[in-house]
Image (spheres, rainbow, N blue to C red):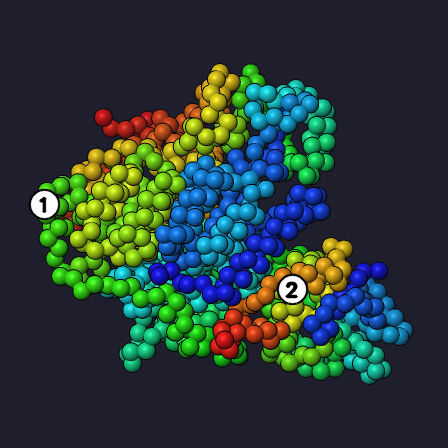
Amino acid sequence: MTLQALTANRLLDGEVVFWSGDAWVEQFADARLYDAEAPAEAALASAKGLATVLIDPYLIAVTDDGAAPVSFRERIRALGPSDHLDLGKQAQGGAAIAAIQHAHGAARSTGRLSLIRRKP
Amino acid sequence: MPTLIRLEDGAFVEAADPFTAVADDMPVPAEGAVVLPLARFEAEGAGLLDEGRPVGVLLQPDEAVEGLAYDLPRLALVALAFPKFRDGRAYSSAALLRSRLGFAGEIRAVGDVLREQARDMARCGFDAFVPSDGSGAADWTAAAGRYRHVYQTAADHRAPAFVERESE
Amino acid sequence: MSVYAYDQIDRDMLADRAAEFRGQVTRRLAGDLSEDQFKPLRLMNGLYLQLHAYMLRVAIPYGALDGRQLRALAEISREFDKGYGHFTTRTNIQFHWIRLKDAPDILDRLAAVDLHAIQTSGNCIRNVTADPYAGATAEEVDDPRVWSEAIRQWSTFHPEFTYLPRKFKIAVTGSAKDRTAARSHDIGLKLTRNRDGQLGFEVMVGGGMGRTPYLGPTIREFLPARSLLSYLTAILRVYNRLGRRDNIYKARIKILVAATGAEDFGRQVEAEWAALDQAAIDLPDLELARIRTAFGVVPFEALPARSTAFEAARAADPAFARFARNNLAPHKRPGYAIVNISLKAPGETPGDATAEQMEAVAGLAERYGQDDIRVTHAQNLVLPHVKLDDLPVVFAELQRHGLATPNLDLVTDIIACPGLDYCALANARAIPIAQDIARRFETPDRAEAIGELKIKISGCINACGHHHVGHIGILGVDKKGEEFYQLSLGGSGAEDASLAAILGPALPADQVAPAVEALVDAYLGLRSDASERFLDTYRRLGPAPFKEAVYADADQA
């Protein structure tokens, strides 16, 4: 199966958090990556019981190399807004953040790109 | 037994409920006060009223109160259903019952009925409530009394801000 | 005095609301309320959970603020957020980095300056949009703020209309020139006078953006002004009873009006209105007069129409001359001007202002602008009453704070919602697209040569970026986790309202700005003369040449 991580927003301040295996942490790089369904689901189930700590815990798909969430939306959650690179999790910089920033998306070559050639 | 809260002379009080709510597939009890769904009322209501029994009608949000206009003077109560608290049609139904159809009997909120709705319901003319959130009369008193003023005229005849200002 | 002066009743209302919300937050944090129970309560106070944190949407009633209020917003952004705020297309302000535990304190701080977040979310009547030039433009029949304030009070905690099928937005314009996008609102109200000189409203109902855009048809040509609130009550009651509740995408009044037909819908409203106790609902003349008085009287000076200082600065400083050309609008009084402050510096986030910028604008309003500030649906600010004599110093101060971008209604004055950079509903980012486009046209000469061109970008189908009424509308869509953008042309939110039509297949993010450039180049080659706007050229020629410009090589590829 594809790798998964467990994420949520913290009730008190809305901060994006990830489950590290023993704590809720703020950086995706510290998230525990699950390569099996059962422990991931078990972690999700226990997170759902933390109603005064978390809002809406859910599992996200992670790229095969474990470096970044698959979806664009989850990458922005793991980084921060692209109009303020000094804000959010990305502000701390480093290799793990850079890896998310430079992760390649899903298929970009839908074929349509080549249709839009610009005149010189 | 669900709690029934009545709004009597401006105070929320818990009260015993003399009415039996008759579901669609349930026989009408042999005696006592009943609340019937609209279709059942149309079929069986006249007979029960003739027996001199207190009769109420339960309206779903898509059932127009105007349809009851003829029977209203004989009805003891109209129950208005909230399938979800976000379904606000019954507020208009209550307002129309009071202000247009002149109904003076009990208007009862049933279904997804939460204390947060206390003020809006009371303002639209509801005077009986069957809460679904476990709240009691004290909660309803607190929730409904939280605001010292209102801005608009409604079925509760509270003086709106523009009237309060006139008298200043 | 410039904004409506709250009395004790208005203040008590906000204080009671803030106290109520504090209690609800306490219950949530203690676990007495579940998230499912709490969410609708926090939303009714404008508190959303977005991607990175909570977002608080603060109402700016009909877009009008005074310096004290804008300073308070700046302080809140600094103390509880990250030093900036985002002005929205509904003339509200959003803070994107709010903590739940701070929210009750923020509501108290807002209430201290007569501001609040009431009904900035939820299926209720939202903040009214009004003409940002209200009280300043000679075009207006009457001041729309008076009527907007009447609507604010009537709609605040309206017991019957708090759980409508869907959210509900009202716009009031005082003049035929429409700066409110009236026909794109659930109800658009245009102040007008009938043949007898009586004041009233043209009533448009059933406009909207979103998944299914409509321009609202007129259901009443003339409604006597004093009957406004009872007539609104009738419309809302018909909608509350008959609007669809089975499908969230079909729940807006526009769907009801379209399905019923404007004439039939109008008849139902008239019937309901006739049966209402209008006298109990409509404000007495004395209260209307009190509201009008509570806005105060602007102490205009008798000034010559021509200002030597202004003319001298214009002759001496080309940058000032450009600003004057693009960002000023004529004032009703000689010697004054309406100053538009663009929040669209190329490369910046459309609609964002830092705390320092907010304080600078507040200071300018207090010193040179009768303490009056407006927010526009194009996410810009306005100082409605500035003396021509003071313009050079106001301009210099704006320049110092990065607020003197001379691009009102030009290609770089782009509307964009927060998009996927912040918003939990978005499918794609809007801000970087706006930044890309703006950078391409950042040379002011070029932007000015292109003339009026309104680009509007939404990050999802909810259309907060008003893409349906953009001369060029851009809609972000999600294609298998990737951001794509659909271009539409020919929309307008002004008095010549129209809906934009989709040009062709969606483009990947990096192709959007080049495509816009191609559209602009095509327009420059096609326009009959420099006075023909992009929109006019498109209306004259239709989509074909523009489609050709963007998708030129499609067949050969």
Residue at 29% across, 39% down? C401
For disc 1, the marked residue is: C315
> Dot 2 corresponds to which residue?
B145
Decide if residue B42 is on the left or right side of residue C515: right
In the drawing, does residue A114 fall left or right of residue B145? left
Estimate the x, y position of residue A34 in percent, counting from the top left.
65, 21
Tag 2 subunit: B
- Label 1 vs label 2: CA separation? 64 Å
In the rendered image, residue B63, in percent from the top left (x then y), is placed at 65, 68
Location of residue C65 by image quarter: bottom left
Which quadrant does the C terminus of chain C fall into?
top left
Q: Under tag 1, what secondary structure?
A: helix
Q: Residue at x 53, y 22 (%)?
A: A68
Q: Quadrant of residue C396?
A: top left
Mark 1 nearby-residue class (10 Å; few <14, some 14–19, many ≥20): few
Q: Which element is circle 2 on? A: loop
Neighbours of disc 2 within 10 Å: few (<14), some (14-19), many (20+): few
Question: The residue under label 2 is which amino acid type?
Answer: Gly
Q: Position of residue C424 (x, y in %)?
A: 52, 39
Left or right of B83 in this view: A108: left
Q: Nearer the viewer, residue A36 or C104?
A: C104
- Residue at 60% x, 52% y: name it: C21
Quarter of the image for the N terminus of chain C: give it: bottom left
Q: Which mark is residue C514?
A: none
Q: Nearer the viewer, residue C53 or B166?
A: B166
Rendered location of residue B116, percent (x, y) = 65, 58
Amino acid type of disc 1?
Ala
* Marked residue chain, label 1: C
Residue C444 lies in what quarter of the image? top left
Question: Can see residue C96?
Answer: no
Query: Could you say which is closer to the camera, residue C511 or residue C28?
Result: C28
**Which residue lies at the image location 47% right of the left edge and 69% below the top edge?**
C232
